[in-house]
Amino acid sequence: MNFKVRAATKEDCRDISRMIMELAVYVKMADQVKISHEELERDGFCPNPFFECVVAEVSEEYKSKEGFTLVGYALYFYTYSTWKGRSVYLEDLYVMPEFRGNGIGKGLLSKVAEIGKKKQCVQLQLSLFDWNTQARNFYAAKGAQDLTESEGWHFIRFDNQSLDNLANEAPKD
């Protein structure tokens, strides 16, 4: 199947938003999605973007049953490891189910790796659900290490009230 991976544009945000919801449905967390395509436009296409994104696009002849030509995306941002230096964090990698098995996921992942290497990143990191063995196998086949098993890392989050409480405890200027 012919497809191309390219940098996302502001005009792609409706499709990216659609696929974010499809991913959320897949992982049984659709009720957790609070972001809109307007927020994606604002946060990804401003002078200092919070994220970058690449999309997989097929030609009209291969469009989805619903008529979509954007069939996958990889959303990522840059972080910093105090031990290793520049890093890229892959927040989402998604390919519509009817297009899986055609190398699109590998194309998206490889493009993010290539972009990271050009920006002198020394590692690509991501997290995924422990039950998603298909994704775990995909990343492992590409050489990823599961740090949960090998190094015992835990992924921690503050949000909602816990984030508010923490912010309210910040020293005042």
Image (cartoon, rainbow, N blue to C red):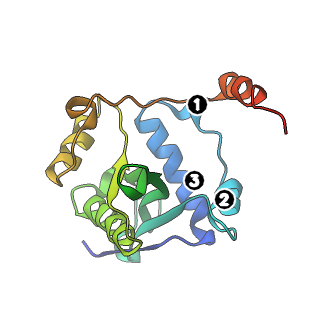
> Which mark's residue is nearer the viewer, 1 or 2?
2
Going by the numbered disc 1, the residue's amino acid type is Asp
Q: Residue at left 22%, top 49%?
A: 144
Element under disc 1: helix
Q: Is residue 12 left or right of residue 135?
A: right
Element under disc 3: helix
Of residues 158 and 66, the one drawn nearer to the viewer in this rendering: 158
Residue 48 place in picture, x, y as percent: 66, 66
Q: Quadrant of the C terminus?
A: top right
> Which mark's residue is nearer the viewer, 2 or 3?
2
**Residue 43 got which mark?**
2
Residue 69 place in picture, x, y as percent: 44, 68
Going by the numbered disc 3, the residue's amino acid type is Ser
**Residue 17 got which mark?**
3
- Check disc 3: other Cα within 10 Å, few if <14, some if 14-19, many if 20+: some
**Label 3, label 1: how many angstroms apart (C-alpha)?**
14 Å
Q: Quadrant of residue 12?
A: bottom right
Q: Residue at left 47%, top 57%?
A: 75
Residue 46, relative to residue 81: is it above or below? Answer: below
Residue 85 place in picture, x, y as percent: 40, 58
Residue picked out by circle 1? 31
Q: Is residue 38 left or right of residue 51?
A: right
Q: Badges 1 and 2: C-beta atoms under 8 Å apart?
A: no
Q: Quadrant of the N terminus?
A: bottom left
